[in-house]
Image (cartoon, helix red, strand yellow):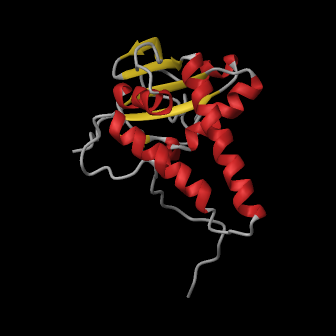
Amino acid sequence: MLRRDIAAVVFSCDEGDLSRFLVETGPCVALHEGGRPLASPLTQHGGETPELTAALHVALTGGRPKNSLLLLDQVGGGRLSQLSGAFVEAMAASSEESLRLADEDEARGEDSLPSFMEHQRRVSEAWLRAGRWPREVVGLQNRLVRLGTARTALAEGQRVLVWHGPPAPQFVVTSGRGPYPPTP
């Protein structure tokens, strides 16, 4: 079973933004009531342990996962790590390949982007093989947005970080009166 007690958030930010969250609760939790979190709770990837995150490095490079995540801090159930330079470069290169294939598909008028989709599928399958994912996980394409995060961070000279810890609620139900008039 996919663990429900842990989530991973891959992100990049300016150094000053690192003070906008607590390692214990993560970048998807605002520091104070009504504040904005550093990262959207929708960017969390449930059930992803540090070992599963590091398995993407293996999938992209064929190398070993050792030293792909460099622990920066650990408080309570939260753990903040920096992705190694080699890991970030491999992710960025895969993102560039995805963009190139999408551009080629579009140039051929193939709106379904078959080359792009095939590349994403291959990366997903390699990551599934490299990690000890539960059987219920059949694809990881939705987690590959982090490849673009790495490409952008590399271009902007930022570090790529990953936080692992207890998931933050993704949706909050509120009640009250909005700006709309009541309906009869």
Place of residue 171 in the rendered image (x, y in percent of width and height, measured from the top left): 46, 52
- Most extreme residue toward the bottom is 184
Describe residue 140's horizontal placement relative to residue 100 as left or right: left
Say which of 34 and 76 sits in front: 76
Q: Which residue: 53% across, 30% down?
A: 27
Describe residue 163's horizontal placement relative to residue 134 as left or right: right
Place of residue 177 in the rendered image (x, y in percent of width and height, measured from the top left): 56, 65
- Which quadrant is home to the C terminus? bottom right
Place of residue 5 in the rendered image (x, y in percent of width and height, measured from the top left): 29, 36
- Which quadrant is home to the N terminus? top left
Place of residue 120 in the rendered image (x, y in percent of width and height, measured from the top left): 53, 49
Query: Would residue 64 be seen by someone viewing this image from the given angle?
Result: yes
Query: Would residue 36 be seen by someone viewing this image from the given angle?
Result: no
Q: Which residue: 74% across, 66% down?
A: 108
Classify 41 as above or below 174.
above
Image quadrant where residue 35 sits: top right
Q: Count up the numbered dots.
A: 0
Say which of 106 and 71 sits in front: 106
Q: Which residue: 26% across, 51% down?
A: 136
Image quadrant where residue 165 sits: top left
